[in-house]
Image (cartoon, coloured by chain):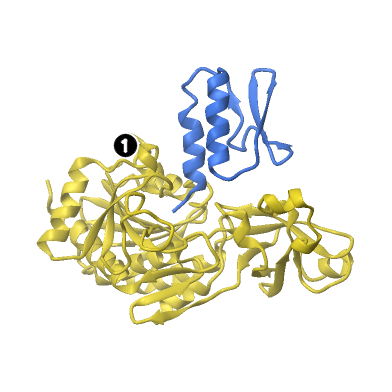
Amino acid sequence: MDKLLKDLLLSDGISGYEENVGKIMTETLSKICDSVETDGFGNVIGKKGKGKKKIMIAAHMDEIGMVVKHVSEKGFIYFIKIGGINDPILMGKVVKIINKKGEHITGIIGTKPPHLMSEEERKVPVKFDNMFIDIGFSSREEVLKVIDIGDQIIFEPNAGILNGDFYYGKAADNRISCYAMAKVMEKLPKNIDAEIYACATAQEEVGLKGGKTSSFKLNPDFALVIDTTVAGDMPGIDPKTSDLKLGKGVAITMVEASGRGTIVPNKVRKIMIEAAKENNIAHQIDIIDGGMTDGAAIYINRDGILTGILSIPTRYIHAPSSVFNIKDVESAVELAIKTIEKIINNE
Amino acid sequence: MSNEGALSAQIKGLLTQTMTKNFFILCRKILLSKDLEIPLFKKSGDSLFVKRGGRVEDSDGGFSLRR
């Protein structure tokens, strides 16, 4: 597994706590861009090239997770969720609480066992506010010597290869796109005839915030968002809900959240599909009912920013570990480059 | 990909509708479809609050809607 990809998957950075993953993006982009800055919101922005057109690539770097809210007298830690987490997936999971020193404190998410639940309690899924984290201490005082209220909590970092091109990792949504964005910047020629901005955005999972502030600042002629999308090739998902398959190429997103998110302009859809076909790049078409990307905030910013979206099909997003196909990441890189070239040459 | 954003936008999308009983029912339907707790509704002054999980969300919570 590529070192940068692994580092990004293992790194921490729930929404609003992106400093560590931001450092990786800063170090990476510094080697391949003309300049890199972290803006006031926490977005990391690298710039490469000179020219009339301004093109922004955006990939959010935050992940879903939790934040410490309260510690009970007996030393159990209560938390709030950051981003869209389905409560039942939390039970029994191993988590890391990252304290002010940057230490990863291991904890287990606990709840009352089914043996002691009433019949009524057993009928309904356990909610997150009836769960707590056990870090192996017996009192509030002891726990607060190790962690603080407000510390971020992430799922136990994991990353690796399942079989062949099938990879897995924590925070694949959206670190695999941060990786793809870095590869795009690396491959674009140094003397490219446009200003290309690679923007690792903050706080996408909690309201598409970094995409909004960074696109306002940059005011690009074109924005290309790279994110993950829901793959449908697993039990329980009907092809009419999602027909996206791992290993069949990057998805060109046309409509998000049944139009409540981005509706990619026809002009952009045409350019992206042409770029894929002309260069024999494996691709699929993504029309999704639920979920949206930074694109939804970018394309309605200022007086409307021309925006395209490349989505990497991923299984089990917003869970402690997700599965993706590295070939789809590679096709995302290739199609992003060809799309950018077309935008530059398109009057 | 954010699903919180989608939920928020679904509710914001309903802002243009008159705040009638039907609006409450729609809002309730969306929240239920997202596997959240059954919301309760409360009017306070000229703001409408959607209550969930035993707490009334504040005006920045994404669930309180101005009339």
In the figure, is residue A130 to the left or right of A181? right
How many numbered dots are placed on residues in this image? 1
* Residue A2 visible at all: no
Figure quadrant of residue A181:
bottom left
Toward the viewer: A175 or A58? A175
Chain A, hue in figure? yellow
- How crowded pointer 1 is (Cα within 10 Å; few <14, some 14-19, many 20+) is rated as few
Above or below B4: residue A144: below
| Residue A250 position in % (x across, y down) | 28, 62
The three-letter amino acid code for the residue at tag 1 is Gly
- The residue located at (51%, 56%) in the rendering is A42
Pick the quarter of the image with the N terminus of chain A. bottom left
> What is the quadrant of residue A180 in the picture?
bottom left
Left or right of A246 on screen, residue A22: right
> In the displayed structure, would residue A107 be above or below residue A287?
below
SS at badge 1? loop
Q: Position of residue A172 (x, y in %)?
A: 45, 66
Residue plotted at (60% across, 34% down): B63
Instruction: List x then y, in percent, for residue A279.
Output: 12, 65
**Residue at 40%, 75% in the rendered image:** A167
Q: Position of residue A140 (x, y in %)?
A: 87, 64
Q: Colour of chain B?
A: blue
Q: Measuring 48% from the left and 54% from the top, which residue is drawn there?
A: A39
**Can residue A273 be spotted in the picture?**
yes
Choose between A37 and A73: the one closer to the eye: A73
**Chain of the residue where label 1 is placed in the rendered structure:** A
Circle 1 is placed at which residue position?
Answer: A304
Q: Nearer the viewer, residue A243 or A23?
A: A243
